[in-house]
Image: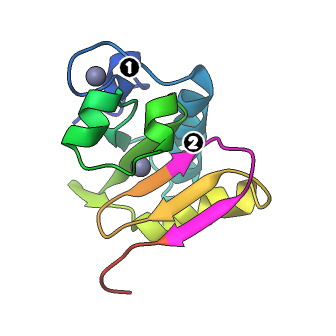
Amino acid sequence: MSSKNFKNSETNCNCGCQLNVMIQVNMMLELVRAWAKVFYNTVNVAVIVTSGARCRYWNDHEEGYKNSEHMYSIACDFKVKYKANGKWEQVPPKMVYDFLNRMFPNSMGLGVYDTFTHGDLREKKSRWDERTKK
Ligand SMILES: [Zn+2]
Ligand SMILES: [Zn+2]
């Protein structure tokens, strides 16, 4: 697992079609990375993208919402991990969600799931919690 800065290709559509997210999505991820470094007092922070841009074909394949922001290259699902006492631990997705909610209280789409956080750059604020256990 790498703690290096984000490589653009990680946010590409997972079908291999090269569709990528807008640069602002990467900036959002870098903001989360910087926060986690300060919060956990470590340089060993990894942001792991599970799904960035999705073309229509891949969105259908992944059973995404019909009008998912992922198809418009403005969304990303991701996990954040940090190394403590030699072990990688996941930052609870709700904490990542709360951080972004504090930073952008009046905009963005933010969703929290059991294993990852969704962030997108829509203008009209939207929030959801899809965790099965809270
Ligand atoms: Zn694709
Ligand atoms: Zn998503």
Q: Residue furthest right?
A: 106
Q: Is residue 128 above or below residue 1?
A: below
Q: Residue at x 35, y 58 (%)?
A: 116
Q: Residue furthest bottom?
A: 134
Residue 96 visible to an observer of this rendering: no
Tag on residue 7?
1
Q: Is residue 123 magenta?
A: yes
Counting from the top left corner in percent of width and height, residue 30 is at 55, 35
Task: Give the quadrant of the N terminus.
Answer: top left
Mark nearest the camera among 1 and 2 is 1
In the shown orientation, is residue 102 left or right of residue 7? right
Determine if the C-beta at disc 2 is less than 8 A from ligand 2: no
In the shown orientation, is residue 97 left or right of residue 5? right
The amino acid at mark 1 is Lys
The amino acid at mark 2 is Ala
* Total numbered labels placed on residues in the image: 2
Which of these two is toward me, 53 or 83?
A: 53
Q: Residue at x 56, y 22 (%)?
A: 22
The residue carrying mark 2 is 34
Tell me which segment is drawn in magenta.
Answer: 119-128
Q: Is residue 91 magenta?
A: no
Categorize mark 1 by other alpha carbons within 10 Å: few (<14), some (14-19), many (20+): few
For residue 9, what is the image quadrant?
Answer: top left
Which is more N-terminal, label 2 or label 1? Answer: 1
Which of these two is toward me, 47 or 65?
A: 65
Q: Secondary structure at mark 1?
A: loop
Counting from the top left corner in percent of width and height, residue 62 is at 22, 44
Q: Secondary structure at mark 2?
A: helix
